[in-house]
């Protein structure tokens, strides 16, 4: 396998909305380290005018996960599990940290990210969808974290994002069984914000994008930051964060009124 120079990732910008597409449909958008590097580069290139990032997969599946060629024990396969397994622990962890950078930016301050998920989102594919703030699924979609069945663990930010969404016990069950979570269950558990027929995915995502960009950018960004911090802050810290954010909003509104 010769990885594409762009990691099979393409982007399109329309005003405040950046669409990022996994573009390897013949392989169900299977991911490689080049994919994660390309995604990290997209995150690093964001400017302040981007308000919404839509993440999609070309073809019939969002992403079937890790490219199969990387599963072998051959240490000569660049980025393969065999190569990682033979590295000193510190080096292996640093390599994985760089891979995680392709996922974690999707909750960067200033943007709201939406995963548009059809078909399968497996392993790295599920973790990529979970890395986004919001998820719209087609009714034939399913999410699955099968790493434990392969003797591995979810290591691309998936455990923290899943536990935030569904709570400890359900996240533990999903991860330890490696079972698929179909779209209807994902909606009930809070892993999906909406479930629509496949032909309605584009319209549902467009409607959500329109709603997210309809309100003042400062208020949206401050509110998103508050909701993100609420899952980790204790009540006193969160109350303080709300006070600080509101004082900034009031000061900005006052300056507009005076101007």
Image: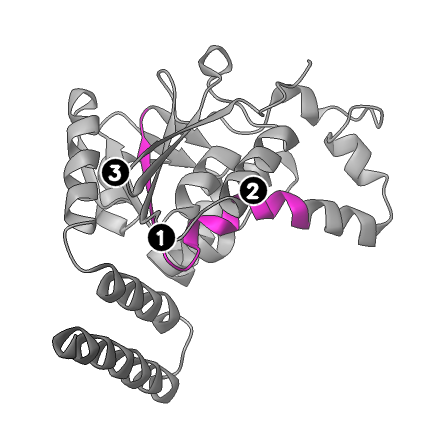
The disc at residue 111 is: 1
Labels 1 and 3 touching (C-beta < 8 A): no
In the rendered view of the protein, which quadrant contains the N terminus?
top right
Q: Which residue is mark 3?
A: 136
Q: Which residue is mark 2?
A: 40
- Residue 89 vs residue 15, the one in the foreground: 15
Pointer 1 or 3: first along the chain: 1
Label 2 crowd bin: few (<14), some (14–19), many (20+), radius 10 Å? many
Residue 228, image x, y percentages: 36, 65
Pointer 2 or 3: first along the chain: 2
The residue positioned 48% from the left and 21% from the top of the image is 29
Magenta range? 97-118
Residue 136 drawn in magenta: no
**Direction from residue 168 to residue 65 in the image, left or right:** right
**Direction from residue 122 to residue 19 in the image, left or right:** left
Q: Under tag 3, what secondary structure?
A: strand
Q: Under tag 2, what secondary structure?
A: helix
Label 3 crowd bin: few (<14), some (14–19), many (20+), radius 10 Å? many
The residue positioned 58% from the left and 41% from the top of the image is 148
- Residue 93 vs residue 223, the one in the foreground: 223
Labels 2 and 1 touching (C-beta < 8 A): no
**Direction from residue 246 to residue 180 in the image, left or right:** right
Pointer 2 or 1: first along the chain: 2
The residue positioned 65% from the left and 32% from the top of the image is 33
The disc at residue 187 is: none
Residue 128, image x, y percentages: 46, 40
Taking the view exactly as shown, the residue that stands out farthest to the top is 26
Q: Is residue 182 above or below residue 2?
A: below
| Mark toward the viewer: 2 or 3 | 2
Taking the view exactly as shown, the residue that stands out farthest to the front is 259
């Amino acid at each position: 396998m010769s990885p594409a120079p762009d990691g099979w990732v393409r982007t399109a910008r329309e005003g405040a909305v950046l669409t990022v597409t996994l573009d390897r449909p013949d392989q169900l958008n299977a991911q490689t380290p080049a994919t994660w590097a390309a995604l990290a580069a997209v995150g690093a290139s964001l400017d302040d005018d981007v308000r919404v990032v839509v993440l999609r997969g070309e073809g019939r599946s969002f992403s079937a996960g890790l490219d199969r060629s990387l599963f072998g024990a051959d240490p000569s396969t660049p980025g393969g599990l065999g190569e990682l397994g033979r590295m000193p622990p510190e080096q292996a962890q640093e390599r994985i940290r760089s891979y995680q950078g392709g996922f974690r930016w999707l909750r960067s301050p200033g943007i709201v990210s939406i995963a548009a998920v059809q078909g399968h989102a497996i392993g790295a594919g599920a973790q990529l969808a979970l890395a986004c703030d919001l998820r719209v699924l087609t009714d034939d979609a399913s999410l699955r974290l099968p790493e434990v069945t392969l003797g591995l663990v979810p290591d691309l930010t998936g455990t923290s994002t899943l536990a935030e969404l569904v709570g400890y016990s359900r996240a533990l069950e999903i991860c330890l069984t490696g079972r698929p979570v179909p779209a209807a269950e994902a909606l009930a558990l809070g892993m999906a914000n909406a479930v629509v027929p496949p032909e309605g995915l584009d319209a549902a995502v467009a409607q959500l994008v329109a709603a997210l960009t309809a309100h003042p950018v400062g208020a949206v960004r401050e509110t998103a930051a508050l909701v993100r911090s609420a899952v980790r802050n204790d009540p006193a810290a969160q109350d303080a964060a709300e006070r600080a954010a509101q004082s900034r909003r009031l000061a900005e509104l006052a300056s507009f009124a005076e101007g």
